[in-house]
Image (tube, rainbow, N blue to C red):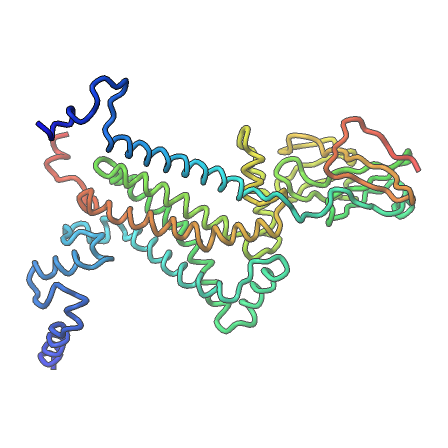
């Protein structure tokens, strides 16, 4: 009679739970919480908080460094500084297809991507794909000491020329 | 002469040290042979008996075994290459060139690693085609096919992560393109790219991450799934030997 489990649990309790079940639930519950916490911390750990990458703001030098009606690529910063008769603008040199560095072809007067053959006009407009979008214009301004500055992280929707 | 050698071999096998390692003991009976396979940590993945048909060249063209062979070559040459390669931006390319021109046998090991990698990808596909066209993926072997698909993905990821390590123009632009393809995933694409590269561009963090994936995480994943793949062959009734003639007739 004494080893009947029903005799040891109070019959009037709202929920009947044996000591063993209680500890199993506690154990599984705490391991689950720990596993979820570890998963969350691991995801956070994999995402770096500080990046030691080059600044998006580039000093492109003095405007008279660029000859009139020219397209100049800086492969290090991946920007074109384009000088037209009206003024200057900056164009991203990174192909909008899969991120390759494009090149200016002076003999054809176009910008072409070596990876998959996209072609652009010198104002960024797409001539042929597979690139889905034109090359974006980047924000350009003159610094206080007269240098052309370009913000690579800031594509501008309204095309404005910098006049010097 | 042969008798003396047999006698000597018998003495070695009866030696106490030998018996402590190989417990099955001496003898050429089927029981002894079976025990030898069953009691060896590596061999016990395989069945103690195989049908003669499954050991013939035409049954498998040995494509699975050849794939595993290239994997072993890749592990050995890869570990040796790691002794001279630093996964850092200023050194990676120079170390690769040193392996080619300065280190003794370096160019041999590097080329062996490279060609084995190409061969492994080719053999994995050939193995899968052979399994598919023979119908060896069908029940009861359908789960082993799934393990095989996982191994295909691990092989391709190993190939892709290894691509970046020479840190030359081909590596840099291939991984730029590849990581931009990953960013085409809906909703979380750019986050996947960021985690993959450890930044917004292919740089020092990306090189280190690809190195760790290539040299630690993916090889361990490959070894784990290869072990399961081999063990499942035994559990699924051995290598597929083709259907018995009566079954084909009845269809």
Q: Nearer the viewer, residue A3 or A26?
A: A3
Q: Nearer the viewer, residue B143 or B213?
A: B213
User: Going by the image, does B186 lie left or right of B38?
Assistant: right
Dividing the image into 4 quarters, which one contains the C terminus of chain A?
A: top right
Dividing the image into 4 quarters, which one contains the N terminus of chain A?
A: top left
User: Going by the image, does B53 lie left or right of B42?
Assistant: left
User: Going by the image, does B93 lie left or right of A108?
Assistant: left
For the image, the number of numbered tags is 0
Name the residue: 89% across, 46% down: A62
Above or below residue B30? Residue A90 is above
Above or below residue A60? Residue B41 is below
Q: Which quadrant holds residue B115?
A: bottom left
Name the residue: 61% across, 62% down: B91
Q: Which quadrant holds residue B21?
A: bottom left
Q: Which quadrant holds residue B243?
A: top left
Image location of residue B3, percent across then percent down: 8, 79
Q: Nearer the viewer, residue B162 or A121?
A: B162
Name the residue: 73% across, 42% down: A56
Image location of residue A19, percent across then percent down: 24, 31
- Farthest residue, direction right: A164
User: Going by the image, does B116 lie left or right of A89?
Assistant: left
Name the residue: 56% across, 58% down: B87
Image location of residue B170, percent across then percent down: 59, 52
Above or below residue B175? Residue A33 is above
Q: Nearer the viewer, residue B101 or A139?
A: A139
Image location of residue B212, percent across then percent down: 49, 53
């Amino acid at each position: 009679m004494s080893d009947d489990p029903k005799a040891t649990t109070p019959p009037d309790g709202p929920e009947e739970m044996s000591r063993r079940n209680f500890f199993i639930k506690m154990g599984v519950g705490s391991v689950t919480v720990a596993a979820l916490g570890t998963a969350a911390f691991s995801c956070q750990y994999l995402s770096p908080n500080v990046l030691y990458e080059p600044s998006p703001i580039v000093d492109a030098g003095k405007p008279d460094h660029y000859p009139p009606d020219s397209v100049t690529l800086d492969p290090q910063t991946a920007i074109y500084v384009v000088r037209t008769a009206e003024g200057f603008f900056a164009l991203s040199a990174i192909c909008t297809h899969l991120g390759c560095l494009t090149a200016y072809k002076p003999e054809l007067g176009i910008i072409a991507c070596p990876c998959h053959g996209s072609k652009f006009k010198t104002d960024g407009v797409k001539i042929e794909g597979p690139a889905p979008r034109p090359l974006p214009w980047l924000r350009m301004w003159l610094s206080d000491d007269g240098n052309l500055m370009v913000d690579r992280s800031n594509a501008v929707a309204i095309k404005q020329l910098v006049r010097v | 002469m042969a008798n003396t050698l047999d006698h000597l071999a018998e003495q070695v096998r009866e030696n106490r040290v030998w018996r402590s390692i190989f417990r099955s003991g001496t003898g050429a009976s089927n029981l002894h042979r079976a025990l030898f396979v069953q009691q060896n940590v590596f061999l016990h993945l395989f069945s103690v008996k195989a049908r003669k048909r499954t050991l013939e060249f035409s049954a498998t063209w040995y494509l699975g075994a050849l794939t595993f062979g290239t994997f072993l070559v890749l592990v050995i040459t890869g570990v040796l290459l790691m002794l001279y390669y630093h996964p850092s931006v200023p050194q990676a390319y120079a170390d690769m060139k040193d392996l080619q021109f300065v280190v003794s046998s370096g160019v041999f090991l590097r080329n062996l690693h490279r060609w084995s990698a190409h061969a492994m990808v080719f053999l994995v596909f050939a193995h899968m085609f052979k399994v598919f066209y023979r119908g060896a993926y069908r029940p009861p072997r359908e789960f082993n096919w799934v393990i095989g698909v996982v191994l295909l993905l691990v092989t391709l990821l190993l190939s892709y992560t290894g691509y970046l390590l020479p840190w030359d123009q081909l590596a840099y632009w291939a991984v730029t393109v590849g990581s931009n393809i990953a960013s085409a995933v809906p909703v979380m694409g750019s986050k996947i790219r960021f985690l993959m590269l450890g930044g917004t561009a292919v740089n020092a963090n990306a090189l280190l991450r690809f190195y760790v994936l290539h040299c630690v995480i993916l090889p361990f994943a490959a070894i784990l799934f290869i072990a399961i793949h081999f063990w499942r062959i035994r559990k699924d009734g051995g290598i597929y030997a083709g259907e018995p003639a009566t079954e084909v007739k009845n269809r």
